[in-house]
Image (cartoon, rainbow, N blue to C red):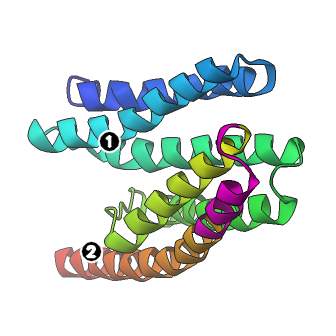
C-alpha cells in the first residue's frame, strides 16, 4: 500500500477530486476563483510527474491515474464549454474517441491477458496533451482575452485533437508489441 499512496499519486488523485469543484466554479463563478483553481490543477499535473521522477516513485497506478485524470479533466471542461455553446459538440466527440478507445483497449487487454498492459507516455501523446491544454486554456480565457485569442486557441485545440489520433495509433502499436512479448514469455514457460 505504501507504494500506491505516494505523494505524486495523492496529487494526481486530488486532481480527479477537484473536477466537480472546477465545474461548479465554471458555471457559478466567481470566474477569478475558477481560473485560480484551474491554474493549480494544471500545475499539479506538472508537479506530480516531476516528483515521481525525482523521487523515483513512478508506479503502475500513477501511470494509469495520471493520464486518466488529464482526460477526465479535459472531457469535463470540454463538455462544460459545449453546454454553454462556447465549443462545438463535434469537438467534444472528436476529443472523446481516442481516450475511450484507449480505456476500452486497456480493459480488453487486461481481460484477455489477466494483467495490465501499461504503455508509458510517449512524445506524440505528451505533445497532444500540451496542445490540448494550451487550446483549452485559451478558450476558457475568452472572457478575459477576447474572441480573436479564442479562435487561435481553437485551432491549437483542433491540432491537439488530431495529434491525439496519431498518438492513439502509436499506443496501439506499442500495446500490441507488449502483448506479443507476453505471449512469447508464456509459451517459453510451457
Q: Is residue 145 above or below residue 163?
A: above
The percent position of residue 64, horizontal first and vertical second, equals: 41, 48
Q: Position of residue 160 (x, y in %)?
A: 55, 68
Q: Secondary structure at mark 2?
A: helix
Name the residue: 48% across, 67% down. Answer: 128
Q: Which mark is residue 186?
A: 2
Asked whether the viewer can see residue 50, the reply is yes
Q: Nearer the viewer, residue 129 or 116?
A: 129
Q: Is residue 153 magenta?
A: yes
Q: Earlier in the sequence, mark 1 or mark 2?
A: 1
Give the vertical position of 33 relative to 80 (above or below).
above
Q: Residues within 10 Å of mark 2 (few under 14, many from 20)?
A: few
| Residue for badge 1 | 46
Pick whichever, 147 or 180, lies toward us.
Answer: 147
Magenta part, dominant SS: helix
User: Magenta part of the protein: which range?
Assistant: 144-156
Residue 189 place in picture, x, y as percent: 18, 74
Q: Which mark is residue 158?
A: none
| Residue positioned 64% across, 26% down in the render | 22
- For the C terminus, give its image quadrant: bottom left
At x 40%, y 73%, the residue is 124
Judged from this view, the residue extending furthest toward the left is 55
Give the answer, above or below, for where 36 lies relative to 121. Answer: above
As helix, strand or loop, the secondary structure at mark 1 comes to helix
Label 1, label 2: how many angstroms apart (C-alpha)? 38 Å
Within the image, what quadrant is residue 161 found in?
bottom right
Answer left or right for 134 relative to 2. right
Residue 181 part of the magenta-drawn span: no
Amino acid at each position: 500500500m505504501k507504494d500506491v499512496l505516494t505523494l505524486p499519486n495523492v496529487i494526481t488523485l486530488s486532481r480527479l477530486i477537484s473536477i466537480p469543484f472546477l465545474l461548479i466554479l465554471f458555471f457559478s463563478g466567481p470566474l477569478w476563483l475558477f481560473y485560480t483553481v484551474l491554474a493549480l490543477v494544471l500545475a499539479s499535473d506538472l508537479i506530480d510527474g516531476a516528483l515521481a521522477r525525482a523521487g523515483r516513485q513512478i508506479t503502475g497506478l500513477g501511470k494509469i491515474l495520471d493520464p486518466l485524470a488529464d482526460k477526465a479533466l479535459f472531457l469535463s471542461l470540454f463538455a462544460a464549454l459545449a453546454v454553454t455553446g462556447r465549443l462545438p459538440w463535434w469537438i467534444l466527440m472528436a476529443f472523446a474517441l481516442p481516450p475511450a478507445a484507449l480505456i476500452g483497449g486497456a480493459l480488453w487487454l487486461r481481460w484477455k491477458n489477466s494483467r495490465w498492459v501499461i504503455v508509458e507516455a510517449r512524445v506524440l501523446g505528451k505533445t497532444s496533451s500540451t496542445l490540448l491544454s494550451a487550446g483549452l486554456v485559451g478558450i476558457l480565457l475568452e472572457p478575459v482575452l477576447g474572441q480573436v485569442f479564442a479562435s487561435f486557441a481553437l485551432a491549437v485545440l483542433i491540432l491537439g485533437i488530431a495529434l491525439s489520433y496519431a498518438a492513439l495509433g502509436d499506443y496501439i502499436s506499442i500495446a500490441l508489441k507488449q502483448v506479443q512479448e507476453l505471449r512469447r514469455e508464456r509459451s517459453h514457460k510451457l
